[in-house]
Image: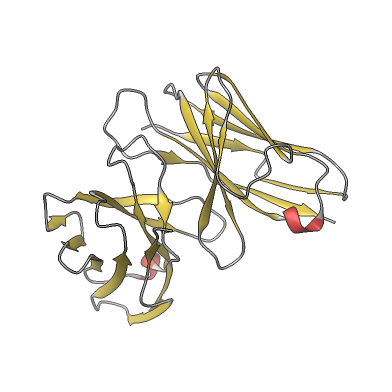
Amino acid sequence: GESVGLHLPTLSVQEGDNSIINCAYSNSASDYFIWYKQESGKGPQFIIDIRSNMDKRQGQRVTVLLNKTVKHLSLQIAATQPGDSAVYFCAENPSGTSYDKVIFGPGTSLSVIP
Amino acid sequence: GAVVSQHPSWVICKSGTSVKIECRSLDFQATTMFWYRQFPKQSLMLMATSNEGSKATYEQGVEKDKFLINHASLTLSTLTVTSAHPEDSSFYICSAPQVRSNQPQHFGDGTRLSIL
């Protein structure tokens, strides 16, 4: 069936460098995507979202890029800090509504090297 | 801000026991809540959609008689793992969107279930 997947299962980054986490999705009809951060033993924490009528959205130290042509999503974290170490999931909301179910990708573990 | 609370945060019990997990929306109403299961080093897999005042909707492959869901009020959904076995050991997470809100849904901090 349709799914959301990631290219890299693990990523190690030097503190202060920028991090880029990638995600491929297969449902071309999807128009709402979310990035979550999950720390050990906790639930997912919302980072940033984007709709398909945009190709870029910025938050505090984070930027999400959406390339609908190749069905690719990325999360950029600027000046990565030790507190950014976590597992990051891209997620797809098939219905496009924020109050509907969310389908998670496999996740990328980000390790920040001090 | 909106908070979703799960209880208990962890539970250890013997095989064959039934375990109830609560998911509460603390300062908002949720007509729908979602239950996910997460095995170690894996992603979250949607188990079911809990609907206030009506039957839950289960994802393919999830046994409804094994995982009983009750959504009796606008702020509480419960997941009961019946006759739990070691293979049911997992991290169970709920989420809840706010009614009439365009905000992303909020997740609880999960319940670690260990069946001996």
Residue drawn at x 48%, y 59% as measured from the top left? A39
Q: Position of residue A26 (x, y in %)?
A: 32, 63
Q: Position of residue B110 (x, y in %)?
A: 58, 47
Q: Relative to the observer, which residue lies in front, B114 or A99?
A: A99
Residue drawn at x 12%, y 58% as measured from the top left? A55
Residue drawn at x 54%, y 65% as measured from the top left? B42
Would you place residue A70 above or below residue A8 in this image? above
Q: Position of residue B31 (x, y in %)?
A: 45, 23
Q: Is residue A114 visible?
A: no
Quick check: B19 left or right of A101? right
Q: Relative to the observer, which residue lies in front, B90 or A27?
A: A27
Residue drawn at x 78%, y 39% as measured from the top left? B82
The answer to which quarter of the image holds residue A76 is: bottom left
Q: Relative to the observer, which residue lies in front, B12 or B34?
A: B34
Where the C terminus of chain A falls, by quadrant?
A: bottom left
The answer to which quarter of the image holds residue A56 is: bottom left
The figure's colour scheme reads secondary structure
Would you place residue A106 above or below residue B115 in this image? below
The answer to which quarter of the image holds residue A68 is: bottom left
Would you place residue B72 above or below residue A95 in this image? above
Q: Position of residue A16 (x, y in %)?
A: 25, 77
Quick check: A31 left or right of A112? left
Q: Which residue appears farthest toward the front when viewing the image?
A: A1
Where the N terminus of chain A falls, by quadrant?
A: bottom left
Q: How many numbered circles are shown?
A: 0
Q: Is residue A24 visible?
A: yes
